[in-house]
């Protein structure tokens, strides 16, 4: 797995996201109610604290022990307990259904619909997060099963509207500016 995502401002954290499917899924899961950089740096923070970012090992940990790791300062999220539980649940699904490797979620998909269905079944992945992640995989990782554009919806277009469009600090600034303009106009990311 090799991607072109550059979002955290930390080369090591970005390299982890671009090479590890579990890390990428965790970063996307954490991307709500916190700045994108903080969310996507979460996997590296967990790796630093745990020594490895192994979904099987996380799934085998008692939930409360894992939540304590997430809540250590600096916390991985604004809501470390609830998000820690979601990350644990995500790792449990990855361990049980995808041989402990997050990249297996998309490794053998046959269509964009198949990919979206797999993502929507993951803890914490609703409709919009799924659309964004489908676009992220297509734009930054070259995972483009037939029909991915319709599953990604507006996130498939070239408008710099989400993490799927970030491959540099300048692109991050463009996405931020676009989101500010949308908010000022009373519009959402999908409009």
Image (cartoon, rainbow, N blue to C red):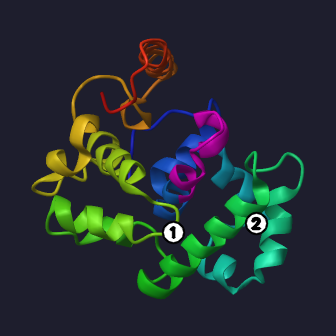
Q: Nearer the viewer, mark 1 or mark 2?
A: 1
Residue 37 magenta-drawn? yes
- Image-quadrant location for residue 125: bottom left
Vertical relation: 121 (above or below) 190? below
The residue at the far right in this view is: 73
Q: Check residue 80 for magenta coloring.
A: no
| Residue 64 vs residue 136, the one in the foreground | 64
Q: Which residues are magenta?
A: 26-40
Q: Is residue 3 left or right of residue 177?
A: left
Quadrant location of the C terminus? top left
Q: Residues within 10 Å of mark 1 (few under 14, many from 20)?
A: some
Q: Position of residue 69 (x, y in %)?
A: 83, 64
Rendering quarter of residue 108: bottom left
Q: CA distance from mark 1 to mark 2?
A: 24 Å
Question: Where 25 falls versus 140 (above or below)?
Answer: below
**Visible in this render: residue 154?**
yes
Q: Check residue 51 in the rendering and tell me which mark sits there, or answer none.
A: 2
Q: Which residue is mark 1?
A: 123
């Amino acid at each position: 797995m090799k991607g072109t995502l550059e979002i955290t401002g930390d080369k090591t954290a970005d390299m982890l996201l671009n090479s590890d499917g579990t890390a990428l899924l965790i970063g996307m899961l954490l991307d709500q109610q916190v700045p994108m950089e903080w969310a996507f740096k979460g996997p590296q923070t967990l790796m630093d604290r745990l020594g490895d970012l192994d979904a099987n090992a996380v799934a085998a940990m008692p939930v409360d022990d894992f939540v304590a790791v997430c809540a250590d300062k600096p916390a991985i999220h604004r809501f470390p307990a609830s998000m820690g539980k979601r990350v644990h649940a995500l790792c449990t699904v990855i361990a049980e259904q995808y041989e402990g490797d997050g990249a297996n979620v998309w490794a053998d998909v046959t269509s964009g619909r198949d990919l979206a269905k797999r993502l929507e079944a993951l803890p914490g992945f609703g409709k919009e997060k799924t659309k964004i992640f489908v676009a992220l995989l297509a734009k930054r990782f070259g995972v483009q099963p037939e029909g991915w554009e319709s599953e990604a919806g507006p996130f498939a277009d070239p408008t710099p509207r989400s993490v799927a469009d970030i491959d540099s600090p300048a692109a991050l600034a463009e996405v931020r500016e676009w989101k500010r303009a949308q908010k000022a106009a009373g519009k959402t990311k999908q409009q």
